[in-house]
Amino acid sequence: MRYNVQAHINGEWISTNETTNNINPANTEEILGSSPMLSKADTLKAIDAAEKAYPAWRATPAPKRADILYKVLKLMDERREELAQAL
């Protein structure tokens, strides 16, 4: 199936019409979802952004990281219907 999907890399949305299926390793007939197929350049850009962000994330104390992830979870829960519609 072809449709526009996006990946968020270093604060920027990257659009593509190509996707790849995410398959359940315990049941290879079950498709769990799909992910955007990025170009080599976009993939390298994502890796570079992750490498640059890692030292600051690593230096963040675990309780603070947990707070950040909890806030993300809370926001996703609050916007559950909107996210479901988008998916």
Image (tube, rainbow, N blue to C red):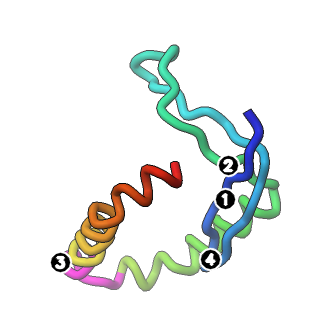
Left or right: 5 in relation to 18 = left
Residue plotted at (37% across, 77% down): 58
Q: Chief secondary structure of the magenta span?
A: helix
Left or right: 6 in relation to 2 = left
Query: Is label 3 in contact with label 1 (beta carbons under 8 Å)?
Result: no
Q: Which image quarter: residue 18?
A: top right
Residue stretch in magenta: 59-65
Q: Which image quarter: residue 9?
A: bottom right
Neighbourhood count class around disc 1 (C-alpha, 10 Å): few under 14, some 14–19, many 20 upward: some
Q: Secondary structure at mark 1?
A: strand
Residue type at mark 3 is Pro
Residue nearest the viewer, comparing 72 with 75: 75
Instruction: Name the quarter where the N terminus is drawn.
Output: top right
Left or right: 32 in relation to 62 = right
Neighbourhood count class around disc 4 (C-alpha, 10 Å): few under 14, some 14–19, many 20 upward: some
Residue nearest the viewer, comparing 11 with 87: 87
Q: Viewer-nearest of labels 4 and 3?
A: 4
Q: Residue furthest left?
A: 63
